Amino acid sequence: MRGHLIFAGYFRDQEKTSETIDSEGWMHSGDIGLLLPNGALKIIDRKKNIFKLAQGEYISPEKIENTYIRARGVQEVFVHGDSLERYCVGIIVPKPEEIVKIAKEIGVSETDLEKLC
């Protein structure tokens, strides 16, 4: 962004200001945006919340986590990626009581959480 409405910089912090506003006056917010057909800018992510896999694909772990966290029986989700690998890894923590409940609903008599997972 650039213009008269953009802030002048961080109070008494020239280093942080230089990281945010370049020599031509452009402010780099760290947001990732999408230009809509009507010309409006929609903020869709944060630059720091993405990583690149070995084949060049950009991944937004927060979006993946937010999708899986909505699944019934999921308590927590963590997605990790390494730029030297072609895949990312997800760790899912189940909700024990919900997993057992789901098993009963679908006719599975097993109650051991480790076996159910």
Image (tube, grey):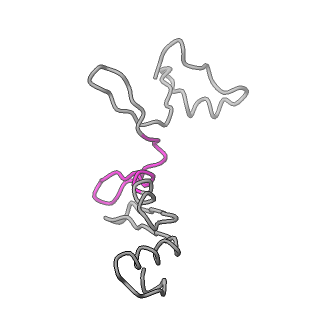
Q: Nearer the viewer, residue 6 or 96?
A: 96
Question: Is 38 left, or right, of 14 in this rendering?
Answer: left
66 inside magenta stretch = no
Residue shown at 48% from the left, 23% from the top = 26
Q: Nearer the viewer, residue 112 or 90?
A: 112
Residue span colored magenta: 45-64
Residue shown at 35% from the left, 81% from the top = 107
Residue shown at 43% from the left, 57% from the top = 70
Question: Is 34 left, or right, of 46 in this rendering?
Answer: left
| Residue furthest right as drawn | 12
| Residue furthest top as drawn | 4
Q: Looking at the rendering, in which quadrant would you find the C terminus?
A: bottom left
Residue shown at 41% from the left, 60% from the top = 68
56 inside magenta stretch = yes
Q: Is residue 34 above or below residue 5?
A: below
Q: Position of residue 76 (x, y in %)?
A: 51, 64
Count every numbered label the image shows and give the total.
Answer: 0
Q: Is residue 70 above or below residue 94?
A: above
Q: Position of residue 6 (x, y in %)?
A: 54, 18
Q: Position of residue 112 (x, y in %)?
A: 48, 87
Q: Position of residue 33 (x, y in %)?
A: 39, 33
Q: Is residue 89 above or below residue 17?
A: below
